[in-house]
Image (cartoon, helix red, strand yellow):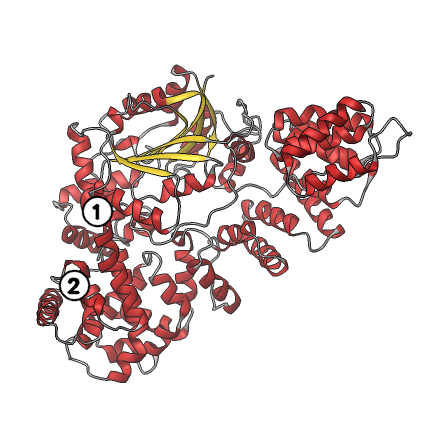
């Protein structure tokens, strides 16, 4: 996450000057007005004219540097900012501007000097103090950075950017509780996208021993609006949901009885079903992302059975049904999201199939349908698979039931229509590619509901400069357009995030699976993103699409090819000189427990059908205390059919080492910029290897990983640059 910085870049006011040696006050006022109005091209012309007419007057240079920086032309901004500081030795703003321009170029020592001079001139300059903190943070001098942020807040207690930056620093050091309190303070002052993102980053690290109403309320908003990917908030939300005494009691009873099943009365008790329906955080969670908790899964598995019993008439209280409807609808949505991963007994299968047939018969006869019938069926199989299910859309339903129908009838039908319109760029003939395509046709990965919010779009140079401030790479000025290839876009989360992330993004997103592409295009339309072109293709055949790209991203894809390095070379052939590439590979060390589990699965003879995956999951959960499979069953990917299949049952998987990646980079003249990894891991690495300030020495990272083999459990994800 980028620090909130560069504050205080300003055209400012002109210093006094002798008549005839300075622009008129009217010219100065016009330039300031253009700058403040964001009319930067016009302001740039006027500022340049001033520097030509009055080369010894600092205001034109100061304004020119400020305008060029705002236009993203950082390489050009530095020289006029430096000239302004030379001509205006007592102007704190000029030195703050110089610091900002230097930091944009990765010249952090010069940036620090500029900010310190600004503070020497004006000690209560809060923007310069905050910016100094950012430069020190980027330089790895964290204690000094913290002191600067705190000094900025002492000067200006309601300084949201400094609160956010301090929270970011403390969270990366493991002080998530303190960081979370700072972010809550920031949100109360002014709710910004940066603060919302930081809330997600801080709160997901927390564990709660009791209910916390204020956090619960903010979490509910963070899930529903959303403030980040709901998957990131699943564990902490489950933690708080279980602190609700009624819900916690239900979970405890379910776990205690497992593998037996409880009646509705024994499971819910007297009031719990109403508490379930009335808990907005629980319902938001069920509607947003797979539940990644064994205890909650066992409770929900039993709750689904009570829904089926209620729908088939084994329980008859209409009042109870009414109170529980919102919860039962959310449960049905959860079952669809997790691809019906919950285990089920033979009698449940028979009862669910019988209810499906009864529902189909009612629809064929155009007869009334009881409110719980479609909800219960939807909890066991997709409603869209029921004959004549579209007729449900013509009936009147409570809002919660309508949401289930949209999810399971409308949206899949829309995806089927979309699939027929997706262009095919290449054939798919490679044997491994065909196997991988078939897997993702059956189980599009992942089935996500809500995208992370769009932040401020950045130029690629600005984005990477903030992410890797000490990395050595060629920094481009801001561009009006970025041509981007997403090689292996899956269901669209990646392509949508990238399209929103980069200024002027024009994205080609390709994948083997039409089912995945149909899902991706539907979600892209839903979010109003118009800059993505989707197509089916085998990336091994993308050698000549008639296009080249400024940025190529392929995360979690190449290691599913027969030869990952051959696929990497194909992508490099499509990358323009000086272009950037983001990649993700499985780590040999971090996947050791996955390899162990896959061997166990093969020994047990489990196949990759949905029913076999359900059975295998239960087997692994039963073995949790006797066999060490590491963190597999705590992985969020363990809790849906599509993600579990990808995790443990994939038809093709290669694993890499950092030594092998380093060799490939050297052979192909590629510059390694850095890993996308939790800041705490970067901090720990730098403590181990303080000589590598940029954290780009892959030989040392290989040593670090050998000592800390779980470091890259989420893949090696990193950025590189192709030589110009």
Q: Residues within 10 Å of mark 1 (few under 14, many from 20)?
A: many
As measured in the structure, the alpha-carbon distance from the residue carrying label 1 to the one carrying label 2 is 22 Å
- Whether residue 298 can be seen here: no
- Write down the quadrant of residue 220 in the picture: bottom left
Is residue 324 positioned above or below 119 on the image?
Answer: below
Is residue 717 positioned above or below 263 on the image?
Answer: above
Residue 290 position, x and y percent, is 32, 56
Residue 63 position, x and y percent, is 73, 33
- Comes first in the chain, label 1 or label 2: 2
Nearer-the-camera pick, 596 or 80: 80
Query: What residue sits 91% from the left and 29% below the top?
Result: 18
Which label lies toward us, 1 or 2? 2
Tag 2's secondary structure?
A: helix
Dots 1, 2 in contact, CB < 8 A? no
Q: Residues within 10 Å of mark 2 (few under 14, many from 20)?
A: some
Nearer-the-camera pick, 367 or 155: 367
Q: Which residue is mark 1?
A: 443
Is residue 273 positioned above or below 110 on the image?
Answer: below
Tag 1's secondary structure?
A: loop
Query: What residue sits 70% from the left and 27% below the top?
Result: 110
Q: Which residue is mark 2?
A: 389
Query: What residue sits 41% from the left and 69% below the top?
Result: 280
- Whether residue 579 can be seen here: yes
Nearer-the-camera pick, 33 or 567: 33
Residue placed furthest toward the front:
26
């Amino acid at each position: 996450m980028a620090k909130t910085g560069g504050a205080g870049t300003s055209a400012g006011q002109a210093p006094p000057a002798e008549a005839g040696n300075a622009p008129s006050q009217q010219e100065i006022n016009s330039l300031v007005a253009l700058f403040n109005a964001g009319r930067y091209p016009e302001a740039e012309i006027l500022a340049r004219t001033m520097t030509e007419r009055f080369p010894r007057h600092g205001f034109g240079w100061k304004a020119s540097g400020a305008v060029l920086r705002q236009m993203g032309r950082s390489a050009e901004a530095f020289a006029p900012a430096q000239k302004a500081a030379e001509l205006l030795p007592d102007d704190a703003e000029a030195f703050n501007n110089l610091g900002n321009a230097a930091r944009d170029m990765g010249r952090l020592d010069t940036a620090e000097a500029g900010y310190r001079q600004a503070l020497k001139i004006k000690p209560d300059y809060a923007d310069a103090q905050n910016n100094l903190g950012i430069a020190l943070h980027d330089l790895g001098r964290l204690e000094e950075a913290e002191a600067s942020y705190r000094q900025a807040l002492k000067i200006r207690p309601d300084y949201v950017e400094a609160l956010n930056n301090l929270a970011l620093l403390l969270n990366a050091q493991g002080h998530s509780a303190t960081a979370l309190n700072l972010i809550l303070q920031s949100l109360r002052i002014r709710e910004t996208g940066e603060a919302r993102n930081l809330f997600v980053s801080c709160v997901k690290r927390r564990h709660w021993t009791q209910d916390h109403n204020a956090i619960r309320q903010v979490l509910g908003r963070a899930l529903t609006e959303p403030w980040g990917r709901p998957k990131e908030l699943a564990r902490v939300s489950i933690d708080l949901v279980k602190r609700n005494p009624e819900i916690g009691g239900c979970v405890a009873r379910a776990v205690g009885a497992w593998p037996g099943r409880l009646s509705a009365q024994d499971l819910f008790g007297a009031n719990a079903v109403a508490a379930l329906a009335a808990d907005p955080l629980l319902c938001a969670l069920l509607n947003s992302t797979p539940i990644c908790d064994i205890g909650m899964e066992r409770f929900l598995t039993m709750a689904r059975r009570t829904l089926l019993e209620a729908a088939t008439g084994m329980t008859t209280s209409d009042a109870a049904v009414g109170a529980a409807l919102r919860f039962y609808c959310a449960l049905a949505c959860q079952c669809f999201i997790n691809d019906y991963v919950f285990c089920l007994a033979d009698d449940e299968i028979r009862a669910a199939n019988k209810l499906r047939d009864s529902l189909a018969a009612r629809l064929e006869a155009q007869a009334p349908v009881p409110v719980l019938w479609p909800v219960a069926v939807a909890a066991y199989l997709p409603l869209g698979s029921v004959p004549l299910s579209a007729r449900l859309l013509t009936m009147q339903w409570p809002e919660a039931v309508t949401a289930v129908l949209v999810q399971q009838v409308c949206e899949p039908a829309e995806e089927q229509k979309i699939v027929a319109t997706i262009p095919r760029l290449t054939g798919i003939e490679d044997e491994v590619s065909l196997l991988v395509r078939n897997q993702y046709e059956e189980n599009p990965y992942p089935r996500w509901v809500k995208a992370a919010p769009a932040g401020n779009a950045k130029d690629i140079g600005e984005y990477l400069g903030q992410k890797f401030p000490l990395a050595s790479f060629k920094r481009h000025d801001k561009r009006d357009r970025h041509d981007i290839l997403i090689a292996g876009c899956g269901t669209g989360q990646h392509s949508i995030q990238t399209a929103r992330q980069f200024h002027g993004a024009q994205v080609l997103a390709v994948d083997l699976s039409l089912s995945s592409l149909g899902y991706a295009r539907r979600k892209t339309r839903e979010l109003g993103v118009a800059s993505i072109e989707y197509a089916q293709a085998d990336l091994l055949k993308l050698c000549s699409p008639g296009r080249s790209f400024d940025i190529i991203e392929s995360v979690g894809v190449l290691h599913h090819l027969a030869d990952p390095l051959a696929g990497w070379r194909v992508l490099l052939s499509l990358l323009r000189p000086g272009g950037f590439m983001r990649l993700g590979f499985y780590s040999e060390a971090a996947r050791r427990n996955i390899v162990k589990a896959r061997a166990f699965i093969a020994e047990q003879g489990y196949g990759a059908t949905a029913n076999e995956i359900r059975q295998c999951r239960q087997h692994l959960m039963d073995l949790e205390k006797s066999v060490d499979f590491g963190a597999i069953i705590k992985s969020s990917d363990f809790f849906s059919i599509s993600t579990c299949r990808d995790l443990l049952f994939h038809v093709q998987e290669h694993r890499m080492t950092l030594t092998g990646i380093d060799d490939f980079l050297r052979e192909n003249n590629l510059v390694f910029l850095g890993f996308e990894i939790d800041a705490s891991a970067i901090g720990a690495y730098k403590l181990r290897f303080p000589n590598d300030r940029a954290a780009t020495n892959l030989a040392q990272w290989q040593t670090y990983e050998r000592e800390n083999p779980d470091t890259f459990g989420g893949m090696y994800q990193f950025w590189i640059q192709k030589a110009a």
